[in-house]
Amino acid sequence: MTTKYDHEVEHHNPREGFDHSEPAARKITFFVIISVITLVVTILALQSYFEKIWNEAVYDKVLSVPGEEVVVGGAVVVDEFEIEAGGAQ
């Protein structure tokens, strides 16, 4: 049989051409499983860290009292003096 290169194609014995032990399926499988577990743990750790930082930032910027002023029942308490929301008392 000839090809477009004008030389004969050499046919080999099929029994000698493939080594069945070549793909180390167990090693590859364990590598994939460990890689996926590492990826999932990394994603969960980053998500947890981000949520912690986000919650701290929300608390600092929104939920915490900025100074000695505390709003109690519509009145602002400053250094033990109470000021009504509508004006000074």
Image (tube, rainbow, N blue to C red):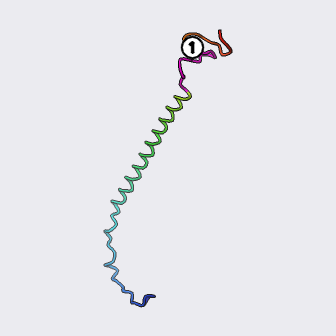
- Which stretch is magenta? 63-76
| Residue 67 sits inside the magenta stretch | yes
Q: Is 66 situated left or right of 2 in this image?
A: right
Q: Check disc 1 and report the residue beneath it.
A: 78
Q: Residue at x 59, y 18 (%)?
A: 71
Q: Quadrant of residue 65?
A: top right
Q: Residue furthest right?
A: 86
**Quadrant where the N terminus is found in the figure:** bottom left
| Picture layout, residue 53 above or below residue 21 | above
Q: How many marks?
A: 1
Q: Is residue 46 above or below residue 1?
A: above
Q: What residue is rendered at 45% in x and 42% in y?
A: 46
Q: Is residue 67 left or right of residue 17?
A: right
Residue 12 pos. (x, y %): 34, 83
For label 1, the crowd category at 10 Å Cα-Cα, with few meaning under 14, some 14 to 19 and many 20 or more, is: few
Position of 6 with respect to 27 (left or right) is right
Q: Residue at x 32, y 79 (%)?
A: 15
The secondary structure type at the circle numbered 1 is strand
Query: Could you say which is closer to the camera, residue 77 or residue 10?
Result: 77
Give percent across and percent down for residue 54.
Answer: 51, 35
Asked if residue 35 lies in the magenta stretch, the reply is no
Is 76 drawn above or below residue 26 in the view shown? above
Q: Position of residue 31 (x, y in %)?
A: 36, 56
The quadrant where residue 81 appears: top right
Residue at 39 percent of width and 90 percent of height:
7
Give the percent coordinates (x, y) of residue 64: 53, 25
Q: Quadrant of the C terminus?
A: top right
Q: Amino acid at mark 1?
A: Val
